[in-house]
Image (cartoon, rainbow, N blue to C red):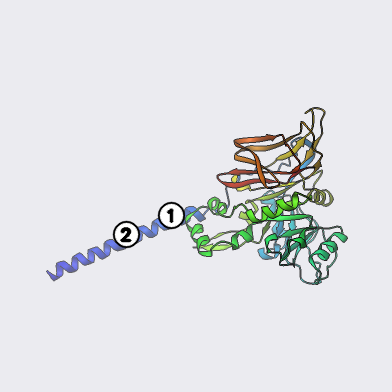
Amino acid sequence: MARSHFARAAAAFANAGLILAALLAALSAIVLAGCAAPLPTTELPPARFIAPVPEFPGLRDYRGIFDFRIGATGLDQAGVADLAKEAQIDFIIPGDRIEPGSSDYGIPGFTSTILFIAGGAFESGGGRIIGVNLHEPIHPDLSTADLISAIRDQGGLAIAAQPAKFTNPADFALADGIEVYNQRDTWLEQSPAALYLRAIFTNTDKFLASLDVRPDVNLAFYDRIAAGARVTMLAGLGAPDDLTVLGSKVGTTPQLMLFYTTHLLARERDQEPLVEALKLGHSYVSFDFLGYVGQFTFFAQTADANTGSKALMGDEVRFAPGMTLKAELPDAADRIAMYQNGAEVASAENARNLEFAPKSAGAYRIEAYRGGHMWILSNPVYVR
């Protein structure tokens, strides 16, 4: 009898072991499904094709990365350029923290086929000011307003990052642009445990989707300022995390280069025209893991479609009867919304175009969504 009880116990123990082994095998399968293919499924063209901007044939649509912290990658500029080439990136603007008195803004010009525009970040007023097109050292003890002036004095642009963290929002009111989204900031706002579990149980696309969160607070800051002044909207990439999950990594530089890009609409791929496009707000952001974006436009059409003038996003145009605001997407979005000074005024479902006749002045911009996540964010057309 004792032996019978012992045999049954042994059998039960063996069965439990088999169940545990099966569970571990299932978990391993999930892990492999989620992490073995590290790159998102962005469908890049066979080779980089720089498309003309719809309705503006004199301009080209250049894909790039803004506020990229090269130092956090462990690579030199040539190594970053190699990865950027694989991701069909045209330009990179660094956002590494600048030490007091330093002028290490990266090496401007072409590294391999990638154009680098000198830049770096300064901690100021509780937030960060990113200088673009810098050449000379900047004194470390300047107020935010004086820092912005010092950046402009050497022909640079000043972009305010982390706007909600500034002690006084008036400190960055004179900035040329506002970084409304940053992958690294979004990552740090989330629970490490939740990030780790998502990395285990989801694939790369779904993991990145959890970081594609509408930046409500920053957009509210932006819309208040843009209602009265021209200011460029940007998204910065920040630094890779390289989170290791059961032998695989997530949040890597190659993944993030395919996550989303900043587009500058310029005459040619050279430093001066790209910096000019950034200053003018001839720019938009695309989250390419939801669908590759090679070209997009948002503009105002005045009077007759054949004889009237067009104003590209970032431009100012005087309000006039018969004006139409038009957004043209490369493919259908689940939802397109148009905002006037932060308030939604028009929308379309399952569409690739949106038209709206404005009734009053304001800063009008576009948000397009797929699967409930941001796909395209445009700069405004300023109707005055």
Q: CA distance from mark 1 to mark 2?
A: 15 Å
Q: Position of residue 31 (x, y in %)?
A: 47, 57
On the image, numbered disc 2 is attached to which residue?
19
Q: Does any portion of residue 275 appear in the rendered image?
A: yes
Closer to us: 365 or 192:
365
Dot 2: element: helix
- At horizontal 69% and vertical 37% (from top left) the residue drawn is 327
Quadrant of the image for the N terminus?
A: bottom left
- Of label 1 and label 2, which has the lower sequence position? 2
Closer to us: 293 or 377:
377
Residue type at mark 2 is Ile
On the image, numbered disc 1 is attached to which residue?
29
Q: Position of residue 104 (x, y in %)?
A: 79, 66
How crowded pointer 2 is (Cα within 10 Å; few <14, some 14-19, many 20+) is rated as few
Residue type at mark 1 is Ala
How crowded pointer 1 is (Cα within 10 Å; few <14, some 14-19, many 20+) is rated as some
Q: Position of residue 49 (x, y in %)?
A: 71, 41
The quarter holding residue 101 reads bottom right
Q: Does any portion of residue 291 appear in the rendered image?
A: no
